[in-house]
Image: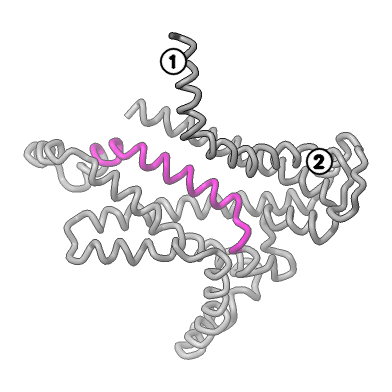
């Protein structure tokens, strides 16, 4: 009886979860293991020979100033983008759950940019920065917009941040909207009866009860921003003068343009480790705050 029950459970599991497990292993696990193997080779990405060279690629990673410069730039980009996305998304959610007329229409409108692919989004905003902003700047004589942001290293960096915030804020806004809706109305009414102002209710009731929404949004924004590639390629291409090359773009150039696939794969693995450490640490600290709240 026990063997038959176990057999039926295994059959049911394989029937429903088997296909998903197969594709997960085929698309994620096996390529990941193969990628780790390639980090110990000097493969150029083209030839059939893959000579094992030990940890030489990992040593080269720590000697590659370009990679660490790109990673430092990525950390700055992630930090600024994550903060701005959370602030703007939270404010939008607060506004669009306050009974504003047509708020469902605005929710859909703010979410729409997230549906546009990064490549297309980059080309759209490239036209905006190069043509629309400059024409507007010349018309009103504002120095900030008279020249393309993409021609200046600092402005190009903030152009990436601007587009990222514009793209992700609407998506995170929906998560915050769900958090606002999940706050018990009777608790809010009780606070109002006790004389709490809207600011006090938001600070002492709403925000603590939305700790899980903050955790999810911060985690999603962090991981997405760390792995930015398509927007980086289509909007700036790493220019001007290579000043906006993010970590993912640097890894791509090292592997496919410089034909150092083993080294590029090693840098990708280091980037993965950095993202994993940051994301897990953020999630752990956020969950700890949820419990305290």
Whether residue 100 sits left or right of residue 173 in the image: it is left
212 in relation to 97, above or below: above
Residue underneath mark 1: 5
In reply to whether residue 202 is colored magenta, the answer given is no
Q: Residue at x 48, y 33 (%)?
A: 15
In reply to whether residue 221 is colored magenta, the answer given is yes
Residue underneath mark 2: 39
Query: Measured from the top left, where is residue 93 in percent x and y?
Result: 30, 54
- Outermost residue toward the top in this view: 1
Q: Which residues are magenta?
A: 204-231
Q: Secondary structure at mark 1?
A: helix
For the residue pair 130 and 48, the one nearer the viewer reads as 48
Structure colour scheme: one colour
Q: Secondary structure at mark 2?
A: loop
Query: Which circle, 2 or 1, is nearer the viewer?
Result: 1
Whether residue 78 sits left or right of residue 217 in the image: it is right
Whether residue 13 sits left or right of residue 154 in the image: it is left
Q: CA distance from mark 2 to mark 1?
A: 45 Å
253 in relation to 211, above or below: below
Task: Please identify the quadrant where the C terminus is shown.
Answer: top left
Query: Measured from the top left, where is residue 175 in percent x and y?
Result: 35, 48
35 in relation to 12, above or below: below
For the residue pair 106 and 15, the one nearer the viewer reads as 15
């Amino acid at each position: 009886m026990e063997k038959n029950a176990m057999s039926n459970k295994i059959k049911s599991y394989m029937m429903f979860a088997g296909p998903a497990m197969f594709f997960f292993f085929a698309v994620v696990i096996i390529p990941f293991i193969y990628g780790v193997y390639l980090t110990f080779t000097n493969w150029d990405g083209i030839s059939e020979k893959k000579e094992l060279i030990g940890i030489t690629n990992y040593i080269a990673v720590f000697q590659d100033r370009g990679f660490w410069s790109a990673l430092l730039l990525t950390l700055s980009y992630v930090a600024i983008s994550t903060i701005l996305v959370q602030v703007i998304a939270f404010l939008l959610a607060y506004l669009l759950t306050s009974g504003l007329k047509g708020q469902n229409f605005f929710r859909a409108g703010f979410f729409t940019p997230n549906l546009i692919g990064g490549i297309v989004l980059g080309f759209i905003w490239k036209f905006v920065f190069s043509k629309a902003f400059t024409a507007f700047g010349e018309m009103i004589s504002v120095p900030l917009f008279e020249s393309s942001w993409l021609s200046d290293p600092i402005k190009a960096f903030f152009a990436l941040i601007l587009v990222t915030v514009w793209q992700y804020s609407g998506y995170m806004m929906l998560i915050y909207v769900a958090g606002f809706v999940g706050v018990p109305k009777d608790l809010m009414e009780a606070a109002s009866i006790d004389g709490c102002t809207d600011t006090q209710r938001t600070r002492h009731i709403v925000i603590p009860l939305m700790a899980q929404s903050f955790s999810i949004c911060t985690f999603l924004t962090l991981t997405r921003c760390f792995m930015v590639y398509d927007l980086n390629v289509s909007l700036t291409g790493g220019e001007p003068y290579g000043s906006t090359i993010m970590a993912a773009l640097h890894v791509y150039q090292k592997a496919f343009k410089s034909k150092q696939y083993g080294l590029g794969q090693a840098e990708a693995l280091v980037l993965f480790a950095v993202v994993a450490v940051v994301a897990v640490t953020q999630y752990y600290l956020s969950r700890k705050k949820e419990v305290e709240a």
